Image (cartoon, grey):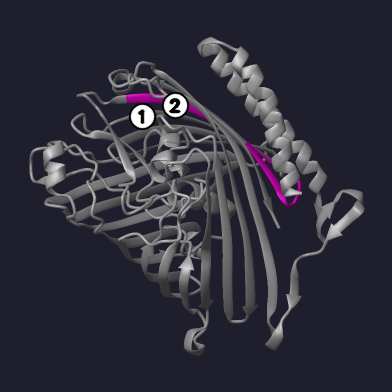
Amino acid sequence: MVALVRSDLRHRANEVSALRAALGGRSGRLIGGTVLAAVLAVAALSAATAAAADDRGLALPGEHVVPPLQTDGPLGSTIGLELYDRVRGEFVDWFGSRSNLSNRYDLVGNKFQLGLRVKREPYEVFVQFQDTTVGNVPRDGVGFGATYFTNTRKTLQNGAILRNAWGSTNSLLGVPGLFIKGGRQLYSSGMEAPPNDPSLSWLQANRLSQRLIGPFDWTHTGRSQDGGQLGYDAATWNATVFGFRPTFGGYNVDANRELDVDLIGAVLSKKELEWLGTTIGQLSYYYHDDHRDLVYVDNRSAAALAADKGRSARIHTVGANLVHVVPLGPGVVDGLTYGYGQFGDWQSLTQRAWAYGVEAGYRFTEVWAKPWLRAGINSASGDTDPNDRTHGTFFQMLPTAQLYAQFPFYNMMNNQDVLAQCILQPDSRLSFRLDFHWLRATSSRDLVYSGGGATSNTFFGYTGTPTNGRNDLAYLTHVTLGVQATQNVLVNLFYAHAWGQGIVNSNFSGSDANYGYVEMVLTY
């Protein structure tokens, strides 16, 4: 079935390519991109209707049903197979390049995962295979398409990896709540203690988690962590410590190997307490040791960067966050805040940096579509003097950057993001989100950074664009539509437009940029 879906998407994409080729000029590119997204969406939805689901499992055409792939195993265990497949078509219309590089291109990617899970309380083992294919990667492009090519040097890329291979118990030494998890696994900072309240859960997952460490699954490969977690999970609090060696990945499909990067962390989480209402909070400490032998990217001169090649960056990050939700009038009001401070060594420099965020919102729970209106500011420091002995740029470590920069020409580093959001849910199977961002560089003497952290031992993982003494980066708006076509099939459509400002105008020949995709996700 997945093969048929891919074939249908490719066929319809080929039909649209001829139409797009006939549309000339900048308006033609925008119209062609919109048509591409619309036709691929119809293809994905029509394919999804052929894979309806019910409680018995995955229902196929002709009233055939594939039952859940789970069976009883020895010693009272259960053994189950898990399937995941995501196919995504993307169009990119980046800011115009002054060096004859391609700023307009299309990508298609597929991520297939097959996992085996064995459970016998209090033990669990999970092994997962992943195969990634990325096609039509630009050889001479700009933007994140160029990052895929830089990592693998192929226009058609494929990689098969072991994505997960871990074992765990939640009753170590017979103590309920004392847990350990070891092996290759995924880790998301900020998600150590998921709440029960749905508003808190959304805010934790979408506005706090993975800012510093995440599986980077927006990309077609993602990243894993080799190591372990140890902690105690009580009714009202959770304490977790971990030590990891991250893998290659993200924009690199060859992701089985480990990076020369070490991560250590400790997190204390407060869960929901009845006497405090729906409130959660965390205290965190992370240590990031990057000892790869490569040239870093920052605002120093090329000679200074080359002189530090091979020197480690040892960064300590301490932080806290707090989220509160309370009923008020015909809805629910929410507020969140977080802050991070960094110290340590940035190669031969002293690291001193900060980041913070404050957001608030109100959701009308008794109104059609339950409109959720939110606004806030997220800001992180930039370096103010490339010639002194202090590095003042906040270092984002290994995040899922696209969770907060969904058109990924920027990230948290040296960035101020003033945002407004509107979220609608007219049906349990339909979600709509509209965002607006006013983006500025915190320091006009630093770079504008993009990327999601290390992807190999030879590619730094972040790229930088000079600010040229300016602060204004862009105004950005984007819209997301999610359709839960069936229990097993999710279709997402996304479109973003950026109006470049001073920094963009001083580096690119065009001030506008567009990005969009349509994807279908099958889980079983």
Is 138 one of the magenta-colored residues? no
Label 2 – label 1 distance at C-alpha: 8 Å
Q: Amino acid at mark 2?
A: Leu
Name the side, left or right, on which 278 lies relative to 311. right
- Residue 446 location in percent, x, y? 21, 34
* Front residue of this view, candidates 301 and 429: 301
Mark 2 vs 1: CB contact within 8 A: yes
Q: Amino acid at mark 1?
A: Leu
Residue picked out by circle 1: 439
What is the magenta range? 473-492
Q: Which mark is residue 476?
A: 2
Regarding residue 92, the answer to whether it shows in the image is no
- Residue extending farthest to the left is 388
- Residue 346 location in percent, x, y? 18, 52
- Residue 210 location in percent, x, y? 43, 52
Can you say whether 153 is above or below 239 in the image? above
Name the side, left or right, on which 433 lies relative to 315. right
